[in-house]
Amino acid sequence: MQLDLIFTNAIIITMDPSRPTARSMGILNGRIVGLDADLAGLTAGEIIDLRGKVVIPGLNDAHCHTAWFGLTLGEVDLSELEDLDQVYACLRAAAETQADDDGGWLVASGYDHHRFGGQFPDRAALDRVAAGRPLFIRRTSGHGGIANTEALRRAGALVDGCPDPVGGRIVRDAAGRPTGLLQETAQALVLDLLRPYPREVLVTAIDRATSRYASEGITSFTDAGIGGGWIGHAPDELGAFQDARAAGRLHARAQLMPAIETLQSDSKAGLGLGMHSGFGDHMLSLGPVKIFLDGALSSETAAQTEPYTTGAVNQGYLLDDPVTLQRQMTAAHRAGWSIAAHAIGDAAIDLAIETFTQLRALHNGQPSLPHRIEHAAVVRPDQLVALADLGVAVAPQASFFHPIGDAMAHSLGGRRAAFTYRAKSFLDAGIRLAGSSDRPCAEGTALRSIQAYIDRLTSSGVVFGSAAERLSAEEALRVYTVGSAQATGFSRDKGQLGVGMLADCAVLAESPLEVPTDEIADIPVLATLLGGRFTHHRL
């Protein structure tokens, strides 16, 4: 029998406890057929001597926003700026050079107010640099945006008595005038003027984003919210992923979470023709349905049982009445969907736990895919026990530690920061912990997130939260491979390099288990294989 590909002279980290390392690996028809002695006497169409390079299972980002990330790659980038004058200059240059099409819109991404001492751009200044064009700045967190006067006018937000939408706020000054800052669902007032994005625009965005993933060793991802709500880009967003796949422009395996708004009002029906979690194949499938229960720590809109420590008394807020949110989750579950509940503050996590407990009592057995809590940030000790009992998977983000860790710790205070964005205690409790970035809300390179799980360092060089939550290098790599596979329902096919598993892997110049922690993020990714085919090749 001739195989398609054999790697020889490699350091293979399998993540399989029964066979943790190997030196050679054979691939046929997209799957691994043997390691080391299994390959004796076999030949292959291609044999590659890796000369001691390291092979790991393909990395799996279990919570990101792929089309959104791809769109940001074509927008005005503010992510490296730290001075408002630089922001205004960058936007002025874009207004002067970008074609005045798409209704004249200027869209920028990557604004993080923490880099600007908590300040937001002035609405009048944005009007001047935009020279009459509507302008919208997406905040890095995704939980708000900044609009200039023309954008607010087109959105109807300047009309006297314009109400705040359910689950959002039009921030106003002391005189009641909109400042331009739109929190949570209020940003949809502007985003709905830009949507729906054409299918080809989304296909191009998916192509850009997943090409980047391939260059970083990422072979699988879960897109956390498509098709509806403020997080989606078009009602036919699923179709854009299908088009990308058919055109060879989808460069990683995609699991898609439809926004709960995409489900039909009839609780007995599901998305489209009644599809539900698990529909699809290894390349493109439907995951849980995504619902937002609260906001974000960066904007202090995540719902807490205790006030934030900064400024006026504020505990954040749920994005709708809790009874309504529970009714939506129950209806989706009855229609065959697993639930991915965005819950960051401990009050939102209380609601998720209460709902999942009710679902278990009402409907015997576990769902086809595990219920999940996205972000699972402020998790009290009693909640940790409840999550373990429920068998819920969690997807927190170590990628937040460096950019906003200091600000989160300041907002929460030391006691609560110690149980925020846990890691080690999740593993010790037996909770399925998925590796994820929330990209583009944070820097999404998986190796950088693995490093962050190990050192937990903020931009000021201190450990975020509790040092007891640090992971070992092996644990952190396992989170981004085995953990993500378990949380997404693909543990039989992904996460390990063993006989019968999908041949999804990355070739690294060095081992993340051996180099100093502060060098993990910069390990060169020499190649990425998806089903035994190269999606990135620098060997």
Image (cartoon, rainbow, N blue to C red):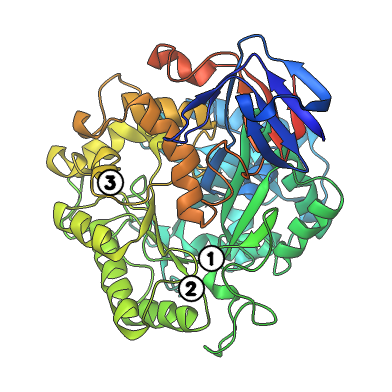
Q: Position of residue 14 (x, y in %)?
A: 52, 31
Instruction: Evaluate whether residue 213 shows in this view.
Output: no
Three-letter amino acid code at disc 2? Cys
Crowding around mark 3 (Cα neighbors within 10 Å: few <14, some 14 to 19, many 20+) is many
- How far across and how far down the image is residue 534, in percent? 77, 31
Q: Which is more N-terminal, label 3 or label 2? A: 2
Tell me, yes or no, whether the two marked residues, 2 and 3, touch with CB atoms within 8 Å.
Answer: no
Q: What residue does disc 3 label?
A: 426
Say which mark, if any, is on residue 285.
none
Secondary structure at numbered mark 1: loop
Give the alpha-carbon distance from disc 2 to disc 3, as whole Å: 44 Å
Which secondary structure lies at badge 3? helix
Q: Quadrant of the N terminus?
A: top right
Residue 514 % position (x, y)? 43, 14
Question: Which residue is at 76% across, 64% downward?
Answer: 239
Q: Please tell me whether mark 2 sits on a helix, a strand or a loop.
A: loop
Q: Is residue 505 above or below residue 488?
A: above
Specify whether 527 is left or right of 242: left
**Residue type, mark 3 in image:** Phe
Q: Give the spatial CA distance, label 1 vs label 3.
A: 46 Å
Sequence order check, earlier mark of 1 and 3: 1
Q: Residue at x 50, y 27 (%)?
A: 447
Real-space CA distance between mark 1 and mark 2, rounded to the nearest whole angstrom: 7 Å
Nearer to the camera, 391 or 267: 391
For residue 468, above or below residue 425: above
Query: Can residue 503 be seen in this snapshot?
Result: yes
Q: Nearer the viewer, mark 1 or mark 3?
A: 3
Q: Residues within 10 Å of mark 1 (few under 14, many from 20)?
A: some
Q: From the image, tell me which residue sits under label 1.
A: 158
Q: Is residue 394 left or right of residue 5?
A: left
Q: Label 1 amino acid? A: Leu
Residue at which label 2 appears: 162
